[in-house]
Image (cartoon, rainbow, N blue to C red):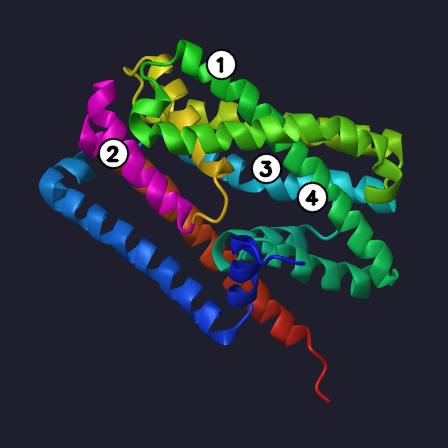
Amino acid sequence: MHQTTLRDRWSAFSATRAGRYTIRAARTAFTFGIALYLIDTLRDIGWADITATMPTHPLFYVCGLLVYLSIPLTDVLTYSRAWGQSLWFGMPAFIQKRIYNQDVLGYSGEVFFAGWAQKKLQLPLSDVLRTVRDHNILSSVASTLIAIGLVALYLSAGEIRLSDLLGRRALAISLAAGAGLLVLIPVAIRFRRYLFAMPRRLALTIFAIQCGRLLAGQALRIAQWSLAMPDVPIQVWFSLAAAALVLSRIPIVPSQDLLFLGIGVEMSTLLGVSEAAMFSMLAVSSAVDKLLNLTLFGYFSIRDFGQKTPE
């Protein structure tokens, strides 16, 4: 006799109209709660201190731009190899894919990109979906493995224990998820022909590119923080980077940038860093990212609308 599990009930509920509204309301309430906390933090710190400590080094913003472009640039490299296209094909589409994934809904960028690629390259939709699926598998494996290694490195060289800040349960869930993936890797390799369509050499090349992107992104982010506050020891940034990595591995967390901003402010006291400087640095970085998303999305939307042929 089939017994309904809690997961089955949740899946059925989330598929209903009431379930979708409930999930959306919960996500909105979560984001609103973080925003209220940050507003209260702003009031306690004071606008004068925050504006006085805003990053002014030009390379701070250059590093932020490179971090922003790292995902679409990686997509250009990997998909051009997979489909035999010129190196810079579809850069606007890859930027839009990033915007959809970050600010609309997780994996909505893949849906947009699959439709764009099928129309642009005149490929069968099934082939496009297989390539997008294989890219996501490789990206997820690379990001999890790199995250596990870097978190271990950061925790061994950092200033604080991450479990003291995020809680033992959240840290245990993230590490257990990573360990579970490690266990599944041999199984995935054994049955790769049923789960994975990409040739081995191409897959290894794309996997290496993804790992390189993740490591370069971490180096750029730590360099950006060091430029904003050059007197702070690098071990402090290792602890902050570890918190960011663990947060990125926790599934279905809305408004990760705002949540990380709150975590960074909380960590500043433990790390002996100015709250105002930490708030300014992370808030400016998040604001620049959002501004780029808004500007580029608006530009591409207007451009695409202008290119439509009147019926």
Considering every residue shown, the one lying at the far top of the view is 157
Whole-Å distance between the Cαs marked 2 and 1? 22 Å
Magenta stretch prevailing secondary structure: helix
Kindly identify the amino acid type of the residue bearing the numbered disc 1: Leu
Q: Is mark 1 on a helix, strand or loop?
A: helix
Q: Is mark 4 on a helix, strand or loop?
A: helix
Q: Mark 1 vs mark 4: which is more N-terminal?
A: 4
For the residues labelled 4 and 3, the Cα–Cα distance comes to 16 Å
The answer for how far apart the CA atoms under marks 2 and 4 are is 32 Å
Q: Which residue is drawn at 89% across and 36% down?
A: 199
Q: Badge 2 is on which residue?
A: 265
The answer to whether 34 appears left or right of 179 in the picture is left
Contact? badges 4 and 3 (CB < 8 Å): no
- Nearer-N-terminus badge (1/3): 3
Disc 3 element:
helix
Q: Is residue 188 magenta?
A: no
Q: Which of marks 2 and 1 is in front?
A: 1
Q: Which of marks 3 and 2 is in front?
A: 2
Q: In this view, does 115 lie above or below 256?
A: below
**Residue under pointer 4:** 136
Earlier-in-chain disc, 4 versus 3: 3
Distance from Cα at disc 3 to Cα at disc 2 = 26 Å
Q: Name the residue under label 3.
A: 70
Q: Give the range drawn in magenta.
A: 254-278
Q: Is mark 2 on a helix, strand or loop?
A: helix
Q: Where is residue 143 in the image (x, y as percent from the top left)?
A: 60, 32
Say whether residue 55 is visible. no
